[in-house]
Amino acid sequence: MIESKTRGERLSGRSLPIIIVVTLALAVSLPAASQERRMSMSGEITSPAYEGWWPNEGGGYKLFFGYMNSNWRETFNVPIGQENYFSEVGEGELDDLEIDGYDFSQADMGQPTHFYPRRNPFLFTIDVPEDFGDKELVWTLKTRGTLARAYGSLKPDYRIDPQVISTEVGGAFGSLDDRLRDNIPPELRLEGEAFRSVRVGEPLDLAVVVTDPDNLPARSNRPLPRTPEQIYRPPASIVAMSGPGTRFAWSVYRGPADHASFEPTQMKTYTDTRMYANSAWSPPWIIPEPPEDDRWVATVTFDEPGEYVLRGVASDGSMFTYQNVTVEVTR
């Protein structure tokens, strides 16, 4: 959920995606020039979102988080600290946005520090123990001087399953197939170490193997539109939809993304619904065929020193699997 005022003014966890995707769907139906006029390219904030929870097989619970950057182009870099931190507190303790909940020992729970445009749902998870009870994991994020909070809890209304995730990301063209309740996410194996070192300007090779154990949902593509009427016709659903089938892409999770260049260009991992926007949610939803050996290869080059965290995202169109690679870039 997104929090910008008090608990009484919170949006419900299921309301957020609906509010967002109506806007996205309307954008798809507009010609490009009209889209540019009606969309906020920059000047808006990013808000954290709590997506829900489910029980872990080995005990405890998994809490899912993401975010919404209301801009279509502007990105943010917010390091872990007073403007990007987590707090583990009792219920309601951080309802007042004037309260500073920063605690160095709790602040970093694996959240991103680079924020791409638009909706980035189910981006990372945090495991909590069986006795978490009524406590809350609160994500505080401040952009453009505006503080927003997302409240992670184990309230029953927030319990989710793989079908819920698929539905909220428009997986398999928005399918409600009951088999998606037991959908298994892709298996993702990184070749090489998860910690690398490279010099500025020196290409770094990256390779992963991605397989889908249950081939669910099965790959399929819709026909390419052939006329302007087909391209700009109103969408059949208010949900931003994605085609089914295994895909993989790298993104910058921590560090300034404009100083990292990937070859080949990576598909966007966020919900960009504009026509031909190189996103899985971008009509006409043509998802690239996976390599014959299921081995995805890329190189990344950095033009500034620093520490970067790259995130590899494997998806079957409904569920996601992640792999981080930390890169120390020196001169």
Image (tube, helix red, strand yellow):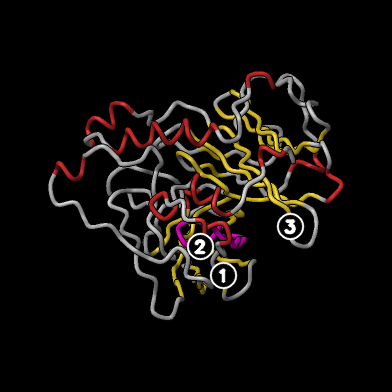
Q: Position of residue 26 (x, y in %)?
A: 32, 33
Q: Mark 1 points at which residue?
A: 187
Q: What residue type is labelled 2?
A: Ala
Residue at 80%, 26% (x, y): give it: 93
What's drawn in magenta, residue-wise?
311-331
Q: Position of residue 234 (x, y in %)?
A: 26, 37
Q: Which of marks 1 and 3 is in front?
A: 3
Q: Where is residue 275 in the image (x, y as percent from the top left)?
A: 28, 45
Residue at 63%, 27% (x, y): give it: 3
Q: Is the magenta stretch mostly helix, strand or loop?
A: strand
Q: Which amino acid does label 1 sit on?
A: Glu
Q: Name the residue under label 3.
A: 56
* Quadrant for the N terminus in the image: top right
Question: Dots 1 and 2: beta carbons under 8 Å?
Answer: yes
Q: Mark 2 points at which residue?
A: 314
* Quadrant for the C terminus in the image: bottom right
Distance from label 1 to label 2 (Cα)?
8 Å
- SS at mark 1? strand
